[in-house]
Image: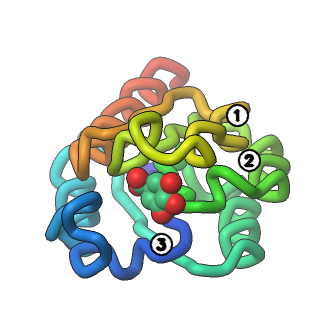
Amino acid sequence: MKTILVLNGPNLNLLGKRQPAIYGHETLDDVERLCSAVCADGFQVRLLQSNHEGQIIDWIHEARETTCGIVFNPGAFTHTSIAILDALNTYEPPVIEVHISQVHKRETFRHHSYVSLRADGVIAGLGLEGYAAGVRRVCQLTGKTD
Ligand code: DQA
């Protein structure tokens, strides 16, 4: 069984409660259910969330040995964290960057992403469907390289 890490950054623990006009009413549990439902046979999803940059970096390092891809919503660290970019640059399998909101329609500070310098795909503005698309893409890319 191959494992896809669905990794979430700061404030996403409050998904469903946090600014629902922007991020919707669904929760991270809903994200986990959706991702598990769409992943191909032979794949499983592991969902993690942290508000702490160092924790996210440690999980990316661990994922080097244990996962076949990362679907990653880095939250605000998207726009600030060279350290997370450096961690992702140590990670070989596919990385798909996901934003629930359409960040390019929002404040200009959300238009730049350090993570995009490493990501193999970038999805923004599709709501939770972006996570599902990310999981499907990791399955597709992983299948091709096996
Ligand atoms: C987000 C967009 C980021 O700009 C923001 O800081 C978030 C969530 C999104 O999913 O749309 O926390 O990554």
Label 1 to label 3, Cα distance in Å?
Answer: 20 Å
Q: Position of residue 119 (x, y in %)?
A: 61, 34
Q: Residues within 10 Å of mark 3 (few under 14, many from 20)?
A: some
> What residue would you read off at disc 2?
88
- Label 1 secondary element: loop
Amino acid on which the number 1 mark rests in the picture: Arg
Looking at marks 1 and 3 on the same chain, the residue that comes earlier in the sequence is marked by 3
> What residue would you read off at disc 1?
118
Q: Position of residue 135 (x, y in %)?
A: 35, 42
Q: Are marks 2 and 1 in contact (CB under 8 Å)?
A: yes
- Name the residue: 54% across, 67% down: 9
Judge from the rendering whether residue 48 lies leftward or rightward of residue 52; answer left or right: left
Label 2 to label 3, Cα distance in Å?
Answer: 16 Å
> What residue would you read off at disc 3?
48
- Label 3 secondary element: strand
- Name the residue: 58% across, 41% down: 108
Q: Residues within 10 Å of mark 2 (few under 14, many from 20)?
A: many
Amino acid on which the number 2 mark rests in the picture: Leu
- Name the residue: 56% across, 53% down: 67
Q: Position of residue 77 (x, y in %)?
A: 65, 60
Quarter residue 12 falls in: bottom left
Q: Is mark 2 within 8 Å of ligand 1?
A: no
